[in-house]
Image (tube, rainbow, N blue to C red):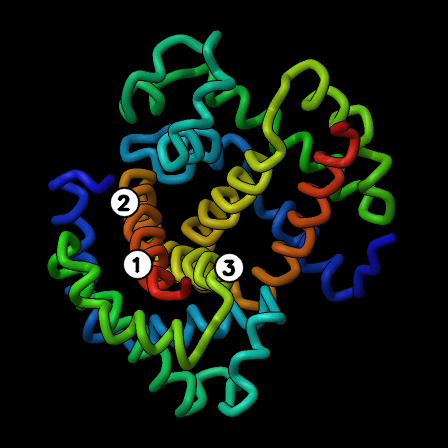
């Protein structure tokens, strides 16, 4: 459960990340593909070399979706409606992979924010990304 | 038997060479790099194993608890054992695994939680020097360690 303070923290951080969405997104994806090679199986149709145009555009898409959700976390199910349908019926990515991506996103944020990625920020971010992943998988079955 | 490339061995050895254990575990003013307490704050249910450690009531209390800090150093020294025995982590950890199962009764999923926290602490400390390739080698190492620690459970 996210406290009011945590929701504000999350909302602020993602607003600040929006201008560098493609860098953060591409970095997180690259880390995921390098650390957990099984995740590459979903991307055989894209060029996933570091910072390729595909990686930048796909990374940007993901970060902007996460940032959009962060604006009003209590409305996540509404905000993510279309993405829920996409993932459940078209993409059908095994939800275990959401955890792997979330971990790599946390590592990316830790590299980016350094000292400012405190335990409190880490906890809030982990909770938010878990909630996001759970909502994303809601229509699977 | 786990196969390590020369590159992986070098990368993992480098992380340890650059790890200042005291820095990773000590709480400074904004408690950036403290491993054990990060785990206790991010995954509060892990506090169940630290009943005898005094005040863990909130993040501040945990941050200032010297027993927690000392425990973090112990854990990192335990990881040292794996680095020194990379070709047989399974056996190097046999007694530690038994200890965690039979005496400490720690749910082995906690090893994964701690290892995720450690990756993030290291990322936070090293910044972009913690490259994707380094992260991958490190993750492989931690996965082997976590598996070895859970092996004697029955």
**Foreground disc of the pair 2, 1:** 1
- Frontmost residue, A109 versus B126: A109
| Residue B127 appears in the figure | no
The x, y position of residue B136, in whole percent, is 61, 62
The quarter of the picture where the N terminus of chain A appears is: top left
The x, y position of residue B147, in whole percent, is 71, 43
Q: Label 3 marks which chain's residue? A: A
**Dot 1, how many residues are within 10 Å of its Cα: few (below 14), some (14-19), or many (20+)?**
some
Identify residue for label 3.
Answer: A96
Q: Earlier in the sequence, mark 3 or mark 1?
A: 3
Q: At numbered mark 1, what does the secondary structure look like: helix, strand or loop?
A: helix
The x, y position of residue B49, in whole percent, is 51, 18
| Circles 2 and 1 on the same chain | yes
Question: What number is the disc on residue A124?
Answer: 2
Q: At numbered mark 2, what does the secondary structure look like: helix, strand or loop?
A: helix
| Left or right relative to A43: residue A51 | left
Q: Label 1 marks which chain's residue? A: A
Q: Earlier in the sequence, mark 2 or mark 1?
A: 2
Q: CA distance from mark 3 to mark 2?
A: 20 Å
**Dot 2, how many residues are within 10 Å of its Cα: few (below 14), some (14-19), or many (20+)?**
many
């Amino acid at each position: 459960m996210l406290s009011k303070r945590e929701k504000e923290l999350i909302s602020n951080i993602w607003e600040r990340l929006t201008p560098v969405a493609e860098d953060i997104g591409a970095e997180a994806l690259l880390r995921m593909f390098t650390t957990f090679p099984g995740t590459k199986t979903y991307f055989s149709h894209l060029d996933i070399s570091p910072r390729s145009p595909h990686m930048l555009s796909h990374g940007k898409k993901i970060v902007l979706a996460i940032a959009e959700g962060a604006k009003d976390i209590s409305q996540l199910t509404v905000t993510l409606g279309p993405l829920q349908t996409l993932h459940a019926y078209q993409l059908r990515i095994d939800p275990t992979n959401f955890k792997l991506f979330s971990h790599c996103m946390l590592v990316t944020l830790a590299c980016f924010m350094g000292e400012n990625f405190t335990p409190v920020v880490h906890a809030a971010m982990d909770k938010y990304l878990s909630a996001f992943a759970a909502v994303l998988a809601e229509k699977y079955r | 038997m786990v196969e390590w490339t020369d590159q992986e061995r070098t990368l993992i050895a480098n992380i340890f060479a650059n790890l200042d254990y005291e820095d990773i575990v000590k709480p400074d003013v904004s408690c950036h790099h403290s491993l054990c307490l990060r785990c206790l704050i991010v995954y509060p249910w892990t506090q169940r194993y630290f009943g005898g450690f005094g005040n863990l009531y909130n993040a501040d209390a945990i941050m200032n608890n010297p027993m927690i800090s000392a425990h973090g150093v112990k854990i990192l020294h335990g990881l040292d054992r794996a680095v020194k025995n990379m070709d047989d982590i399974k056996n190097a950890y046999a007694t530690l695994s038994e200890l965690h199962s039979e005496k400490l009764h720690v749910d082995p999923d906690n090893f994964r939680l701690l290892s995720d926290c450690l990756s993030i602490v290291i990322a936070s400390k090293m910044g972009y020097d913690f490259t994707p390739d380094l992260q991958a080698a490190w993750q492989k190492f931690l996965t082997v360690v976590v598996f070895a620690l859970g092996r004697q459970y029955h």
